[in-house]
Amino acid sequence: MATGISRQGLAILAIIPVFVTLRRLWLRSRRVLKVAKIDERVLILGASSGIGRSIAHLYAERGARVCVVGRRREKVEEVAEECRARSSAYGYGATRVMGVAGDFADVDDMVRLRTTLETEWQGVDTVIVAAGVSALQPLMAVAGLEAHSKGSKFVPPKATKTGIQRAVDVSVAATRGNYVGPLVAAITFIPLLSATSASPSILLVSSLAALIPAPTRTIYASTKAASLLLYQALSIEHPKINFTFFIPSTVEGDFRASAVDQGPVREADPNKHGLKREDVAQRCIEAVDTYEKTVFMPRLMRPGHLLYWIWPSFVEWRARIKYNFTV
Ligand SMILES: NC(=O)c1ccc[n+]([C@@H]2O[C@H](COP(=O)([O-])OP(=O)(O)OC[C@H]3O[C@@H](n4cnc5c(N)ncnc54)[C@H](OP(=O)(O)O)[C@@H]3O)[C@@H](O)[C@H]2O)c1
């Protein structure tokens, strides 16, 4: 009898991956039936480098219309050219790609971009919000203080007015890049998506740092957490739009070079141990295709991040090691 039950249990366990794969294929076909890959109009905010650039490459290769956006005009044009070459190489022609220089936290830039999408494409189907800025220093260091004795003593003993103001300025810059940008993008493009797409989708590239606290990431993590919660709440307010929240751990690349607080990077080189940008981009597109809501990368982090609520001291210890943080 016991053997029978365990066999049944094993059979059910064996069926789960088959069921998950079939469900994914069914969901994928559902979106493709509504928006064919070659008709898909994809806006990528933050595509002049990094993850956004890799996402733009992959969409161009499968024949989508792609709009590459970033503040550095020459980089935007460079990536748009790369996308045109890939689109042509795969037989779709070079005219399906646009490059638009703009700041996603700037209302004028985003309204201008919306007009361009309305004029050129008569709308948009998929909005990828990949833009973001890093901040790498402990909060007290940003304010000019060195912490000693496990963070309880400081040199100098208190923050100056200038130091506090610097921390405020850095926080404002991070908030602009990680929260105001996603907010402006949402207000500008949600009505356009709703009105013009048969299957409107938004993907926010968030971060594991938005869910698990880490030393030296006080400003970065808290501003990324703000935009994650913003989009999670928007997803409830706009149930006809497919929201995906993409939550990766460290990714290879130069993200740290654009830090709004400058200063040393303490952890190991992300280009040696980080996720590969192409893998992250591939997974982002798969998640949009299959209407996935929350994607952790690596997958283990889905249960992993809950450990913080069960055993915080363990996660804090691991975080200190990962970020090479001692006081
Ligand atoms: N790298 C990681 O370890 C990691 C880990 C988890 C999550 N993430 C998240 O992944 C996203 C992309 O990071 P990445 O590693 O690809 O970094 P990246 O190479 O620095 O790319 C960031 C992109 O965002 C653009 N951008 C920044 N601020 C912008 C603004 N105000 N307006 C328009 N575009 C802006 C940048 O272009 P311009 O400078 O030309 O504007 C660039 O194209 C970020 O949201 C980040 O929080 C990264």
Image (tube, grey):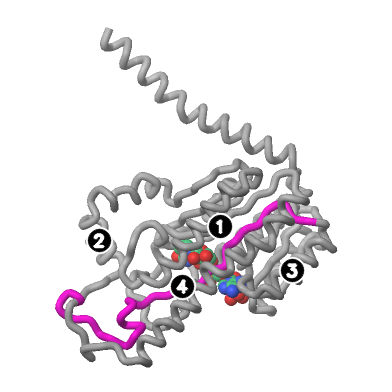
C-alpha gap between disc 1 and disc 3: 18 Å
SS class, disc 3: helix
Mark 2 near mark 4, Cβ–Cβ under 8 Å?
no
The disc at residue 134 is 4
Is tag 1's residue or tag 4's residue first in the polypeptide sequence?
4
Q: On the rendering, which quadrant does ligand 1 occupy?
A: bottom right
- Give x and y (percent) for residue 93: 82, 58
Q: Residue at x 29, y 53 (%)?
A: 308
Image-quadrant location for residue 106: bottom right
Q: Residue at x 80, y 67 (%)?
A: 116
Which of the two marks, 3 or 4, is nearer to us in this view?
A: 3
Is tag 2's residue or tag 4's residue first in the polypeptide sequence?
4
C-alpha gap between disc 3 and disc 4: 25 Å
- Give x and y (percent) for residue 89: 76, 57
SS class, disc 2: helix
Is tag 1's residue or tag 2's residue first in the polypeptide sequence?
1
C-alpha gap between disc 2 and disc 3: 42 Å
- Give x and y (percent) for residue 268: 34, 69
Q: Is residue 200 above or below residue 7?
A: below
Q: Amino acid at mark 1?
A: Leu
Front-most of residues 263 and 91: 263
Relative horizontal placement of residue 128, taking residue 157 as reference (left or right): right
Residue at the spot of label 3: 113
The disc at residue 204 is 1
Residue at the spot of label 2: 316
Please say whether residue 139 is one of the residues in the magenta stretch. Answer: yes
